[in-house]
Image: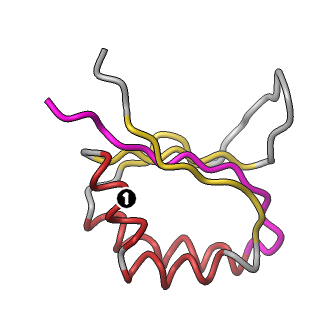
């Protein structure tokens, strides 16, 4: 059994209209790698530390798929639309098979 892969991002969006263009542009790459949104914005409540206002968790069939999607030409085009309109952090992490 292969562990799933995840993108976990938390960011602040400065230009909602431009960010919506990024979301539309990343859809094809995410679909190509069978990505599934587990968290996409929504209500959140900070309990410890510091965090940005938007959290996204995307699940992939494997860690390799998560990395390949991020590195794909299609996602890199979409990412270029995001970097100037939001600030934050993103990590790719392997799931736990425990």
Queried whether the magenta region covers residue 3, the answer comes back as yes
The residue located at (70%, 80%) in the rendering is 18
Q: Quadrant of the N terminus?
A: top left
Identify the residue position indicated by label 1 in the image. 67
Q: Is residue 45 placed above or below 78 in the rendered structure? A: above
Q: Quadrant of the C terminus?
A: top left
Disc 1, SS: helix
Instruction: Please give the range of residues in magenta.
Output: 1-16
x and y percent of residue 38 in the render?
46, 40
x and y percent of residue 21 in the render?
59, 80
Q: Is residue 17 left or right of residue 90?
A: right
Mark 1 burial class by Cα count in 10 Å: few <14, some 14-19, many 20+: some
Question: Which of 77/24 is in front?
Answer: 77
Q: Is residue 36 placed above or below 33 in the rendered structure? A: above
Quadrant hosting residue 74: bottom left
x and y percent of residue 32 in the render?
25, 67
Quadrant hosting residue 97: top left
Q: Is residue 49 placed above or below 21 in the rendered structure? A: above
Residue most extreme to the left: 1
x and y percent of residue 33 in the render?
27, 61
Q: Is residue 41 left or right of residue 77?
A: right
Queried whether the magenta region covers residue 98, the answer comes back as no
The residue located at (51%, 79%) in the rendering is 78
């Amino acid at each position: 059994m292969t562990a799933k892969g995840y993108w976990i991002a938390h960011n602040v969006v400065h230009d909602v209209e431009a960010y919506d263009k990024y979301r539309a542009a990343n859809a094809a790459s995410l679909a190509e790698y069978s990505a599934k949104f587990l968290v996409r914005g929504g209500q959140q409540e900070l309990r410890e530390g510091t965090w940005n206002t938007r959290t996204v968790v995307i699940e992939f069939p494997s860690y390799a798929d998560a990395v390949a999607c991020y590195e794909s030409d299609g996602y890199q085009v979409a990412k270029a639309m995001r970097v100037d309109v939001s600030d934050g952090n993103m990590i790719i992490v392997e799931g736990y098979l425990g």
